[in-house]
Image (cartoon, helix red, strand yellow):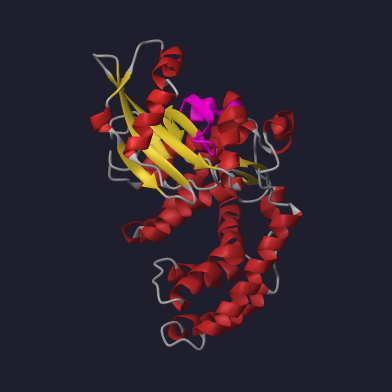
Amino acid sequence: MNSLEEVIRCWKQYDWEKKLKKVLGKNVELVEERIECLKNTREKTSIWKLVLTDGKDHYPVVLKIYKLPLKENHSLEINMYKNAYNIYHEFMPQLYWLEQKVNGNEIWMFTECLQPLRGQIKLAPNHLERIIPTVAKFHAITFNNRFLQHADLFDSTLPYFDSEEKVKERTKGIKKAKENLDLAMKDPNLRELVAPRYQIIKKILTKGPVFFPEITESGQCLIHGDLHVHNICCENANDDEENWKVSLIDWESAKHYPCWYDLVVLVELLIDFRSDWQQREEEIRTKCVQVYCQEMLKYGITFNEDPLRLLKKAYLQRTLEKKLSSHLQKVLDGGKSTLLKRYLEKIEVWGKELGLY
């Protein structure tokens, strides 16, 4: 676990004021009393918010400390900044400095501190229409064959949907879902919820691990992979501004996957969490899909199948391959899941609509 004293000591020891001067183009000093720890775990990463000043203005900076040996998702995020930043810079915080071998076994990365969308506004459905154009532009850069011209920017840490490793992972997730469904039927806290759909879902699970080949055939690209509102930043988020400058943070979950996986997290899971949106959910998802397709068309990208069905298929694929088992497990272990009921309902309703049973 990193300490405040250690951050200050290393700041001086590695002379980062001088190094960041080259990046920022001005002399800056660290405002020690405004250092803020955002996250600190020995096993994973430490994240700090620093404030620099040139004597007149203040410049917030994010410091992310990675422990060696790096986990694959940490290697992936560092690679995104070191190599892929060249083509994705408009969607990412600016990389100020990357220092390796700090304290012998750490990497310290300094990036621009962007303003999170969360906290600026109360998110409404129409706000998604201002975020989606950025997502579409980001997807279009590596969509299908366009990925080939940028493939050398990514190392072996980038996950691929069609890889042997991911197929095994999906197969394992489906097996675990079957086991947890059986356990749920014996659990007094779950039986009533699961029993009406037990036979249907067990039958559906036998069709995996790829339930809908169409979602991969409709187009794959680099996706963010964790596109919830905590990871979306905007400089000018207010109700009077139509054209938001949207940036994305936390690139640990980036992967080469069907494009619709990002829309599932951004749109569909948000609907699942927001009970106040659910009376209008069909209207909301339809509008979001329309905006996405209109934006993708600007980059010459179209879809052969009804895009609304593709979104629903991606949602079910993601749920059946991983999320169903993990949320059942959470409740079996004595916890709570706000999403499990929605997952079960949508597997039943959309599973029938999309021909899974």
Is residue 287 rendered to the left or right of residue 7? right
| Residue 283 seen in this snapshot | yes
Q: Residue at x 43, y 66 (%)?
A: 339
Compared to residue 90, the image places residue 256 above or below, namely: below
Quadrant location of the C terminus?
A: bottom right
Tell me the magenta residue range.
87-107
Q: Which quadrant of the figure has residue 173?
A: bottom right
Q: Nearer the viewer, residue 93 or 58?
A: 58
Is residue 294 rendered to the left or right of residue 118? right
Q: Nearer the viewer, residue 133 or 141?
A: 141
| Residue 242 seen in this snapshot | no
Q: Position of residue 230 (x, y in %)?
A: 39, 45
Compared to residue 59, the image places residue 125 above or below, namely: below
Q: Residue at x 74, y 52 (%)?
A: 163
Q: Which quadrant of the figure has residue 62?
A: top left
**Number of numbered discs:** 0
Is residue 319 rendered to the left or right of residue 51? right
Q: Position of residue 240 (x, y in %)?
A: 28, 30
Q: Nearer the viewer, residue 222 or 166?
A: 166
Q: Position of residue 188 (x, y in %)?
A: 42, 88
Q: Residue at x 28, y 45 (%)?
A: 122
Q: Is residue 235 magenta?
A: no
Q: Is residue 106 magenta?
A: yes
Q: Which quadrant of the figure has residue 193?
A: bottom left
Q: Position of residue 184 (x, y in %)?
A: 51, 82
